[in-house]
Image (tube, grey):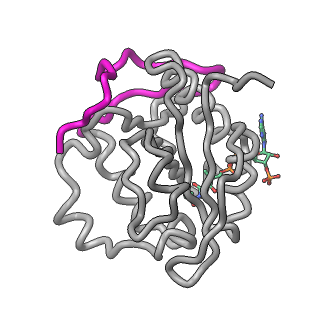
Amino acid sequence: MTDPRPVAWPTAPIKTERLVLRESEARDRAAVIELNASPEVGTYLGGPRPRAELERTVPEVPGRRPGWFVVELDGAMIGTIQLKPHAPELPGSNHRREAGGTELGYLFLPEAWGHGFATEACTAALDWFGGALPGEPVVLYTQTANVRSMCLAAKLGFTELERFEAYGAEQWFGVWSSVTPPA
Ligand SMILES: CC(C)(COP(=O)(O)OP(=O)(O)OC[C@H]1O[C@@H](n2cnc3c(N)ncnc32)[C@H](O)[C@@H]1OP(=O)(O)O)[C@@H](O)C(=O)NCCC(=O)NCCS
């Protein structure tokens, strides 16, 4: 599918205090498989994917598309961030259908949790996105039971649009914008 958003990609690597956000390379493949096979990572995402299937299907260079960042710490991948065109789940509510925009996703290896890396990396990714497409809304889905993800969404400045039931769990749908609406 062609990405309809007018973003220049790949972007130059984005450096934060501790991390680098960059496009993916062949050397990231093993960590991408690890991420998707991890039971901890998959807890609120429908479970881990079978490692054998991942070995078969993950491309030589994984995630080569606009807005798909590898997050690197000291030269090694610790997670990924995706900013992809938002495809509302159907049948969706008006909120979800009308939100449009871009959807944020984040996956970090469990050993990288609890250090503020996800906050640091997502903040940088949203800064980049807000600069590239000012005012374009970014939406986010997460299970309300996913406490770490709910905390992260709040720290990043996402606000709730609605909660709904899907996949046997309560889901949270929120929105972020680089432009603050007038009071
Ligand atoms: C969601 C996820 C990215 C959150 O990771 P995280 O490490 O908890 O997130 P943050 O970067 O915000 O880190 C916050 C933690 O770091 C701690 N921390 C340590 N040093 C810190 C620093 N310098 N700055 C900020 N926080 C710091 C905070 O106290 C907090 O710890 P606590 O939750 O134990 O109190 C991670 O749990 C994950 O990848 N989960 C699996 C994938 C998933 O469910 N994704 C959601 C659907 S898109």
Extent of the magenta region: 1-26
> What residue is drawn where x is 23% and y is 39%?
26
> Residue 16: x and y, percent?
60, 21
> Residue 101: x and y, percent?
44, 39
> What residue is drawn where x is 53% and y is 54%?
109
Q: Is residue 79 left or right of residue 7?
A: right
Quadrant in which the N terminus appears: top left
> Residue 59: x and y, percent?
18, 51
| 169 to 103, vertically: above or below | below
> Residue 66: x and y, percent?
31, 32
Question: Was residue 9 drawn as part of the magenta stretch in this picture?
Answer: yes
Q: Is residue 103 left or right of residue 60?
A: right
> What residue is drawn where x is 44% and y is 58%?
35
| 74 to 155, vertically: above or below | above
Quadrant in which the C terminus appears: top right
Query: Which of the 4 image quarters holds residue 25?
Result: top left
> What residue is drawn where x is 32% and y is 75%?
50
Question: Was residue 170 drawn as part of the magenta stretch in this picture?
Answer: no
